[in-house]
Image (cartoon, coloured by chain):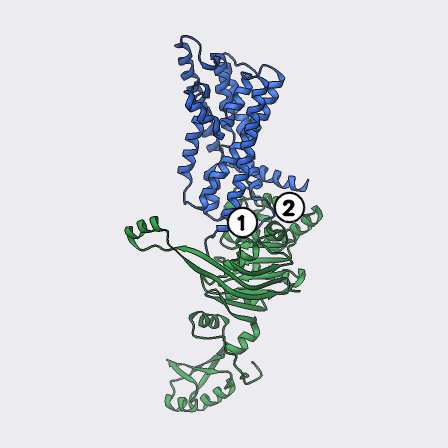
Amino acid sequence: MGAFNKYLSFSKASLQIMLVYKSSLALNLVGTIFYVVAMFYLWQTIFLNQKGALPGDFTWQDMKAYILVSFLLNSVLTWYDEWVMGRDIREGLVAVDLTRPVDFQLKRLADALGPVPIELTSAVVVAIVVAAFFGGIALPPDAVHAGFFLVSAVLATITKFALIYCVSMLAFWTTGVTGISWARLAIQSIFSGALIPLVFFPGWLQTVAAVLPFQGLISTPALTYLGKLDVPTTVALIAIQAAWAIGLLMLGRLTWRRASKAVTINGG
Amino acid sequence: MPLIEARGLTKKFRQAVKEPGLVGSLKHFVTREHKDKLAVDNIDFSVEAGESVAYLGPNGAGKSTTIKMLTGILVPTSGSLIVDGLVPHEKRPQNAKNIGVVFGQRTTLWWDIPVIESFHLARDMYEIPVERYKANLAEFTELLGLAEFMNTPAGKVSLGQRMRADLCMALLHDPKMVYLDEPTIGLDIAVKDSIRKFIRRLVDERGTTVILTTHDLGDIEDICKRIVIIDKGKIIHDGDLKALKDNYARERVIHFQLARPPESMDVICAGLPTCDVSRDGLRLSVRFNRFHHQAGEIAAAVMPHAEVMDFRIDEPEVEDLIRKVYLGQLSLASTPSEAPVGADA
C-alpha cells in the first residue's frame, strides 16, 4: 500500500505541475479542436465523393467514431513526452531521482499518467461537442466490445508510455531527442492508423503495420470500439497489444540498466 | 564496524578524444577515440557513525564522483564500498532510505509546486510515519525559518530559501547519514551561518553522520572535526582538523602600528634574523614561524627600536593552508616532528 501511495503522489504532483501551465494547456486544447474538425471535414469530403464500398466496409458513420476514438487515444500522454524526459536526463536531474528509494521507470510512468485525467476530460468534452455538431456517433455495439475497448485503450496508453520511455533513453547517448521524438510521432501517426485506418493501406504496407507495435496505439482499440472484428480476432489483437506493451516496458528497463551503468553524470 | 568503508575505490571515466577544429570533429565522428580519465584513484577511507567529515579538494579533484558512488548513482570501476552494510549501487533504493543528499547546485524540490508539496512527496516517497513526519517538519520549519515561503513554488523562492528547504527535504526521513555537496554555495553570510548552525546541531543532537564537500572553509571550521583532502583522485590528507592546523599552519604575523618611522630598519631586521620583516608607512609587519618564536619575543625585539602605539596578531588561516596544498606549495606527506613553542599553540 505504501509503495502504491508513493507513486500516486508522484502522479498528483505531475498533475499539479500541468495545471501551473494554464495558457499552454489552453493553447493545446485549441490546437486539438482545429485538428479534429479538420479531420472530420477531410473525411466527410472523401466519403461524400466515394462511389462504392470502402475496404473493411467503412461507412461515414464508422469513420466518425474512428476519428473521435483516435482523437481521444492521441490526447493522452501528450504532456509528458521525450522532451521532458530527455531534458531531465541531459540536465542530470535523473541523478536526483537516483538518490531516492523509487523505481525509475515506475516513477516516470506515474509522472506520465498524472496529467491523464485532465487530458482525457478536455478531449472528451471536445469529442462530445464535435460529435453533436456532426450528427452524433455510434457507440460500441455491445457491452462485450465496450469492455474489450477499455482493456485495449489501457494497453494502448501503456504501450505509448513504453515507446516514449525507450526513445527518451536515447538521450543518454545523443544530446537532443527532439528530432527522434518527431520521427517517432511521424511513424506513429502513419502506422498506428491515426491518420488513415490501416485497412485502407495497400497489402504490403498493412503487413508492415501488423508487425510493428504502433497498431496497438490506435487501430486495435478503435476497431474494437467499432465492433468490426469478431471476438477471436479481437482477443488475438489485444494479446498482441499486451505482448508489445510488456516487451517495450522490458526493453526500456534493459536500456535504462545499460544506460545507468554507462552514465557519466556531468561534474567530477 | 564503520558506517562507511571504502577500499581501493576507483572510478574511471571514458572521455572522448577530440582534436581541435572541423577536421578533428570529423575524425572523432568516424573513429570515436576515447581515453580513460581516473576521477577517483584507489582511495581508502572509513567513516564511523556520528562523525562529521569535510571532504575537500580543488575543482575536478574527484569529490563529487566519490559522493555519487556513495549515493549509488555511479558504479565504481573497481574496489569495494560498503555503506551501512550495503553496496550502494547494488541496493540503490534501500541505500537511498538511509541517506539524505543535498546538492548545492541542484534542487531536489519540485520546481513548479509549493515547497510544502515537495515535503508531502518526501513523506510518501520515504514512507515516513505520520507522527515522525509532523514532528520533523515542525522542528525543521522552526529551525530553518521555512514558514514564510512554505506555500511558494520552489522555482520562485530565493537561493537561500531554496537551500534551507532542500536541507529540510533531505532530512525529513531521519537519514543515518547526510551527504552535503557544496551546501552553502552562492549564499549570503547570514544564511550560511544559519545553515552551518543547523548542520552542527544535527551532528551534535541527532548524531547524524555528515559528509560535506565545500570550497568554503568557513563551513568546515564550523561543522567538521575531520578533514579529508583529495587531489587528482587521490586522498592526500585524512585527519583531525585541529591537528592539521597545529602541524602545518606555522606562520603567524604580528603587525605594529608605529608613532613615527623607525630610525633604522636594519637594526630591527638584525634583531630578528629568522623572520620576515616588512614596512608599509607606519605599519611594520613581522612574519614568523610559531614553532620557533613566541609573539612576545618578537615584540621585545621590535619595541626598543620603534615607538609602538598598537599591535595585532594574525593567526594562521586554514584557508591559506588549503590554498597552499592545492597549489602544491605544501606537501602533507611528511609529518613535522617539531612542536610549536609557547602555550598558545
Q: Chain of mark 2?
A: B
* Disc on res. B123: 2
Q: Nearer the viewer, residue B146 or B133?
A: B133
Q: Is residue A147 above or below residue B196?
A: above
Who's the residue at 41% across and 37% down the image? A180
Would residue B28 appear left or right of B44 to someone viewing this image?
A: left
Would residue B40 appear left or right of B22 to someone viewing this image?
A: right
The image quarter containing residue A232 is top right
Where does the image place residue A185, in percent across and percent down from the top left?
Answer: 43, 31
Q: Nearer the viewer, residue B164 or B189?
A: B164
Q: Is residue B260 above or below residue A105?
A: below
Distance Cα–Cα, label 1 vs label 2: 16 Å
Q: Quadrant of the C terminus of chain B?
A: bottom right
Please state which amino acid type lies under the numbered disc 2: Arg
* Disc on res. B310: none
Q: Which chain is green?
A: B
Residue found at the far top of this picture: A51
